[in-house]
């Protein structure tokens, strides 16, 4: 059980600064994200929280990678990108990863990060901002609604197991290799 001291500590007003992420922050951001985005909670195969994801985003979109610092510690991050679609004059912004250290939840840190990210997007000429999250991630859904997001679109993932066909193919390849050896 949390002591009164713990919750007092949590409610303590801390000064939080949002700044662009820099190369020395990569490892800290990655490890913080590891605590927030487990494979079970983020089953998207097209995007996985791993060191490559953070490094790639930093390389391709460093201007849209932000961190929040409190007491000289990184306590949150927002990583995003922009995209344009063919046959659309509109520029889209995508907030890909937003995370706050659980010890600092409820202190307005994600709001600060989001507002800075939104301002960067506006300066970039973005007309529509996109976010996505699991349907049962209620804190995130509440958060995004509070930030003004609406019009949720459902997207369902289906899967087809190709393991039997893969095994068959491997067996066929192995058999033809043995045949070639026999003929030599
Ligand atoms: C979602 C998340 C980023 C919110 O961070 P936060 O710093 O705690 O959010 P804020 O303090 O700025 O909250 C702003 C508003 O969001 C809503 N909100 C945030 N957390 C909430 C929760 N657990 N339950 C209900 N509403 C919540 C509230 O409306 C809140 O306003 P209020 O404090 O006036 O009630 C944080 O919970 C998190 O890191 N979650 C894990 C990672 C994740 O799911 N990221 C989003 C998808 S990439």
Image (spheres, helix red, strand yellow):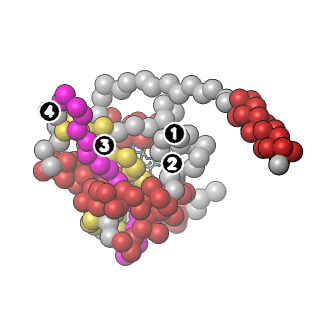
SS for callout 4: loop
- State which tag comes first along the sequence, 4 or 3: 4
SS for callout 3: strand
* Residue beneath disc 3: 94
Closer to the eye: label 4 or 3: 4
* Callouts 1 and 3 close, C-beta under 8 Å: no
On screen, residue 56 versus residue 5, left or right, reads: left
What whole-number distance in Å separates the C-alpha atoms at marks 2 and 4? 29 Å
The N terminus - image quarter: bottom right
- State which tag comes first along the sequence, 4 or 1: 1
Identify the disc placed on residue 89. Answer: 4
* Residue beneath disc 2: 48
SS for callout 2: loop
Q: Name the chief secondary structure element in magenta.
A: strand
Query: Quadrant of the rendered structure where residue 158 is?
Result: top right
On screen, residue 53 versus residue 150, left or right, reads: right
Q: Is residue 50 above or below residue 89?
A: below
- Is residue 83 rendered magenta in the image? yes
* Callouts 4 and 1 close, C-beta under 8 Å: no
What span is colored magenta in the figure? 72-89
What whole-number distance in Å separates the C-alpha atoms at marks 2 and 3? 15 Å
Q: Is mark 2 within 8 Å of ligand 1?
A: no
Disc 1: CA contacts within 10 A as few (<14), some (14-19) or many (>=20): few
* Residue beneath disc 1: 44
- State which tag comes first along the sequence, 1 or 3: 1
């Amino acid at each position: 059980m949390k002591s009164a001291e713990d919750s007092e500590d949590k409610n303590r007003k801390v000064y939080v600064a949002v700044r662009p992420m820099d190369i020395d922050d990569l490892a800290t951001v990655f490890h913080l994200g590891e605590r927030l985005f487990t494979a079970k909670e983020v089953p998207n195969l097209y995007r996985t929280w791993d060191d490559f994801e953070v490094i790639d985003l930093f390389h391709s979109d460093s201007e849209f990678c932000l961190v929040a610092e409190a007491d000289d510690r990184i306590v949150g991050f927002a990583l995003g990108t922009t995209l344009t679609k063919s046959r659309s004059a509109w520029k889209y912004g995508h907030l890909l990863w937003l995370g706050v250290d659980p010890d600092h939840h409820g202190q307005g840190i994600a709001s600060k990060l989001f507002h800075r990210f939104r301002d960067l997007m506006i300066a970039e000429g973005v007309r529509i901002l996109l976010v996505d999250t699991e349907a049962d991630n209620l804190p995130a859904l509440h958060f995004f609604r509070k930030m003004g997001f609406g019009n949720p679109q459902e997207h369902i993932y289906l899967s087809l197991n190709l393991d039997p066909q893969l095994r068959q193919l491997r067996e066929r390849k192995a058999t033809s290799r043995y045949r070639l050896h026999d003929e030599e």
